[in-house]
Image (tube, grey):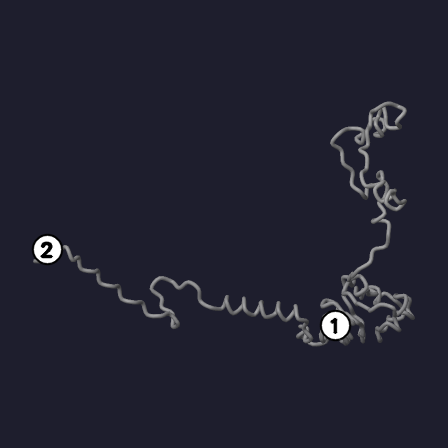
Amino acid sequence: MAMIHEITKDAGKYKARKRVGRGEGGGRGKTSGRGNKGAGSRSGTARKGAFEGGQMPLFRRIRKYGFSNARFETNFWIVNLREIAAHPSFAKGGDVNQASLIAAGLIRDDSRDLKILGDVAKEGLKLKLKVEASRVSAAARKMIIDAGGSVNETGTRRDFVRGVDRNSEDRTPKNLTKKAKRLTAAAAKRASFKAKPKDLEPGAKSEDAKPAKAPKAPKADKNAPEA
């Protein structure tokens, strides 16, 4: 006598094959469950598992997780020297920093770093300005200094982390990362390789060149007749 757990165990052991096209009574007759017309009704078609009928798939609708450099992006408030020179607050020169530019209405707030660009009118800059900003372009720096002013670049967070002094002529990073050190070493190696003499002109001698070896004498033929 079979027990109930033995019957249910063997009941789903073998699944019957789906037999289509065997009449309307079976539920899979006529079109055999493929519908009417279209690519799905033809043989040889395959559809990806994530396909949702042409609408935006779920994996593109959900929020994406993972690392992104977007949060480390440096955003600036950008002000041109043309705007500063044309503003009544700086008609006689003066200090140009975030506080004075906010008071003048040229930037909104101090949530971003300040960058000064050198776009001015044709007559150039004629105001004596004392500029303090995170970044100042090379053209703007030259114009301000030529007009008798001064420039103090405080740098951004990225400059501080990399050890870059924006006020010095040498603006190479002092705090190099592992990748930057590797790239710097590779560049130095390439430069030293290029400095070595490669091909000398015909007849020229290099100090490091080794003396040429004398050609070997040909071996005597043992089978040759004696003189």
Residue density around tag 2, few if under 14, some if 14–19, many if 20 or more, within 10 Å: few
Cα–Cα span, label 1 and label 2 = 87 Å
The answer to whether 71 appears left or right of 189 in the picture is right
Where residue 65 sits in the image (x, y, percent)? 82, 58
**Residue that label 2 marks:** 225
* Residue closest to the eye, 18 or 203: 18
Callout in the foreground (1, 2): 2
* Residue closest to the eye, 155 or 43: 43
Picture residue at 25% right of the left edge, 63% below the top = 216
Q: Which mark is residue 135?
A: none
222 over 185 or under it: above or below: above
Is there any visible trace of residue 48 in the rendered image? yes
Mark 2 residue element: loop
User: The N terminus appears in which quarter of the rendering?
Assistant: top right
Picture residue at 74% right of the left edge, 71% below the top = 141
Where residue 32 sits in the image (x, y, percent)? 83, 27
**Residue that label 1 marks:** 159
Contact between marks 1 and 2 (CB within 8 A): the answer is no
Where residue 38 sits in the image (x, y, percent)? 81, 29
Q: In which quarter of the view is residue 182 placed?
A: bottom right
The answer to whether 146 appears left or right of 195 in the picture is right
User: The C terminus appears in which quarter of the rendering?
Assistant: bottom left
Q: In which quarter of the view is residue 117 placed?
A: bottom right
Residue type at mark 2 is: Pro
Where residue 72 sits in the image (x, y, percent)? 79, 65
Q: In which quarter of the view is residue 176 placed?
A: bottom right
Residue type at mark 1 is: Asp
Picture residue at 89% right of the left edge, 28% below the top = 27
Return the disc, 1 or 2, that comes first in the chain's sequence. 1
* Residue closest to the eye, 169 or 176: 176
Picture residue at 83% right of the left edge, 55% below the top = 64
* Residue closest to the eye, 42 or 21: 21
